[in-house]
Image: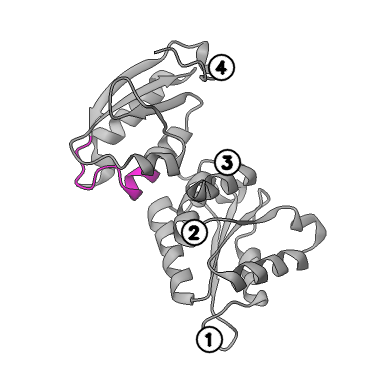
Amino acid sequence: MHNVNASRAANAFAPLTASAVLVNAVGLHARPSVKLTQCAKGFAAKIEFALAPDGPWTDAKSPVKVMRVKAPQGATLHFRVAGPDGKAALAAVLALVHDGFGEA
Amino acid sequence: MSSSSSGNVGIVIVSHSSKIAEGAADMVRQMVGNAVPLAWTGGDTDGGLGTNVAGILEAIEAAWSTAGVAILVDLGGAETNSEMAVEMLAEDRRARVVVCNAPVVEGAVIAATESSGGSSLAAVKRSAEEFYA
């Protein structure tokens, strides 16, 4: 899965991948989408996610794009992260999903 | 995240209805948090449905940020009155205020989300306008 559109900066770092299941009742609706976007924006790394391990990939820093995915409860979010702070970024987004975005 | 709000782009909500404007602002506060300067205005000067330039100017002032202010509007008059308000600003401020072509509620939440991450005024506007893209 070589993404020719990946930025030059991101290419310098091997992408890290991991997945997490959406546990919160509403899935990736408005409020969780905002939280995911805000979390992702705190890192320099390119952060993308998809509902399948091979994409299509969505930019986790774009609130509109994240909401359009409409991922339901029980869906698996596959993350692909590349950048100097990629490891911390991946840990942070995974923690957010595991915690149900602070919701029940 | 308790980032200082002064550096983030301010958001102004302009609706014909003060209830819509206030409700949209409530959604922004609850969903995005307090890291973004936010103000709303709605209704004409008699308290009926409409918008007024003075109210919009006050809201711009209240949400002012050195990073600029993005205005979200609903229908016709809200847009023209907002543009009029922008033209009445001092010249150095005028270039730092934009009216977004986006739905007022969704646009406000998205614009504020973008702003809360420290994005530029151009990025905030672009993100809000993705709704119609």
Magenta part, dominant SS: loop
Foreground tag (1 vs 2): 2
Q: CA distance from mark 1 to mark 4?
A: 53 Å
List the residue tagged with mark 2. B103
Q: Chain of mark 4?
A: A
Tags 1 and 2 both on a single chain: yes
Q: Residue A42: x and y, percent?
A: 47, 33
**Along the viewing direction, whichever of A99 and B2 lies nearer the viewer:** A99
Q: Secondary structure at mark 3?
A: loop
**CB within 8 Å, label 1 to label 2:** no
| A60 sits to left or right of A78 | right
List the residue tagged with mark 1. B47
| A79 sits to left or right of B10 | left
Q: Residue B102: x and y, percent?
A: 53, 56
Residue closest to the far bottom = B46
**Along the viewing direction, whichever of B18 and A95 lies nearer the viewer:** B18
Q: Quadrant of residue A52?
A: top left
| B21 sits to left or right of B68 | left
| Amino acid type at image mark 1 | Gly
Q: Which residues are magenta?
A: A22-34
Foreground tag (2 vs 4): 2
Which of the marked residues, 1 or 2, is nearer the chain's N terminus?
Answer: 1
Circle 1 residues within 10 Å: few <14, some 14–19, many ≥20: few
| Amino acid type at image mark 2 | Pro
List the residue tagged with mark 3. B119
| Amino acid type at image mark 4 | Ala
